[in-house]
Amino acid sequence: MSPALPEPGRFALGTATASYQIEGAFTEDGRGPSIWDVFSQRPGATADGRDGSVACDSYHRWTEDLDLVAGLGVEYYRFSIAWPRIVPEGRGRVEERGLDYYDRLVDGMLERGLVPSATLFHWDLPQALEDEGGWLVRSTPEAFAEYADVVAQRLVDRVGLWATHNEPWCAAYLGYAAGVHAPGRQEGGAAHRAAHHLNLGHALAAERLRAAGAEAVGIVLNLAPIWPEREEAREVSAGIDAIRNAVWLDPLVDGAYGEQLLSVAPELADPELVQTGDLDRIQGSVDWLGVNYYTPVRPDVALADAAPHPEGGAYPGVAPFDLVVREPRTDIGWEIEPAGLTDVLTTTWERVGVPIIVTENGAACVDEVAPVAEGEAPTYAVDDQDRIDYLRGHLAAVNDARRAGADVRAYFVWTLLDNFEWAEGYTKTFGLVHVASEDQTRTPKASYRWVAAHADDLREAARVAGAAVSP
């Protein structure tokens, strides 16, 4: 089996992608439709009206993409597995051609000296399960566990590092409350049902993975520091923190949904939803925790003349509020604040006490493609110094967390390729590699060259930062 977590005291680098964002080939080799295939066909669902049917065509260009990962000088490649490519109807019939694809992908990583890190669910729920109620019904986590077992039986001999879900907050609250992500439902407090079923699905899948021989099973959460903009916003901030962070961490650590959470999510007190034994299965079900960080959350009291924030509906049960976004910002409008990463890593380590990997961190930037003059020394097609500054600052923030004692083992850059950015379509670019939409040509940006040139120095700086703290 491939190595799993980096050893205590070591520090590794990686990069990450997600199946729906890069693979394309959405009807090829028996793949069934996902909720994102269906949702993105709605008028106005994505910023440019486009979808992931082609994306980066990585399903056919995976060897080229793995060469790019290897050339980056990192050890880990975090990828996600498309549930509808393996079990097209969500349960029952297994599509062997889908498993064969991931066989080839994993073998390709190992041949290049890369450590595979697999995520089972990065939002592409089979549409057939959504038609039955999706994450609002208990049969979906049960189907997820069956799918996890199918994948594990094929790949566990070569994949050591597993995550069940990626950012279940987005799946539950952007998908079933705010309606800005697939499946595009606006059902308020019902989204808390989805949250519990995602928690349960994680626990059931983790059990199947371990039974198949998985050594390191975790979950990836987009935790955020919640910093009230002023004293009057403390109460609303507590509610936001409960739905953004505690709904996942409370059951993992305490085996319960806490009082603050129940005050804004009374649905989680329903014994028909949270059945006997559920929370016991969730508690202690991770060997490691993935943290995705992009920006802090700064709640403020609701102002009469403020435009509603698009994520406002993602916190059902919380009183109306506004979100303050300070400068500087990325192209997607998110505040750039590396100290938020230090905050979330140190507080999460204190709360959970298992090894942490920064599984996503990166920036959407305005990437201007510069022509390369023929006959001259090569220049970068995209000279994204702003992205380099972002990465440099956030890697320093990781080192600050390690100096403070947080057991952070690795940092994965989001993302390898410019890709389908969910509701933003192809209008926002996070990649280290530019992808030309007209012919899929991959061109490494300045940020790619920077990571490749400094990978050893970045690892050493992180090692030194954590050296004074016993693992």
Image (cartoon, rainbow, N blue to C red):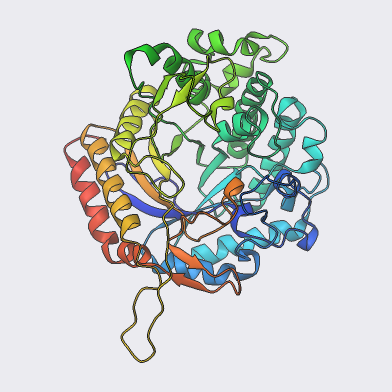
Farthest-out residue, front: 305
Q: Quadrant of residue 455?
A: bottom left
381 left or right of 9?
A: right
Q: Quadrant of residue 355?
A: top left
439 left or right of 301?
A: right
Residue at 64 percent across and 39 percent down: it is: 181
Q: Quadrant of residue 70?
A: bottom left
Residue 146 in the image: state x and y as whole percent: 73, 38
| Above or below 203: residue 242 | above
Q: Is residue 271 visible?
A: yes
467 left or right of 147?
A: left
309 left or right of 375?
A: right
Residue at 33 percent across and 13 percent down: it is: 231
Q: Is residue 10 visible?
A: no
Residue 470 in the image: state x and y as whole percent: 22, 34
Residue 13 in the image: state x and y as whole percent: 36, 53
Residue 277 in the image: state x and y as whole percent: 64, 15
Query: Where is the C terminus found, in terms of image quarters?
Result: top left
Camera-nearest residue between 43 and 20: 43
Camera-nearest residue between 413 and 330: 330
Residue at 66 percent across and 41 percent down: it is: 148
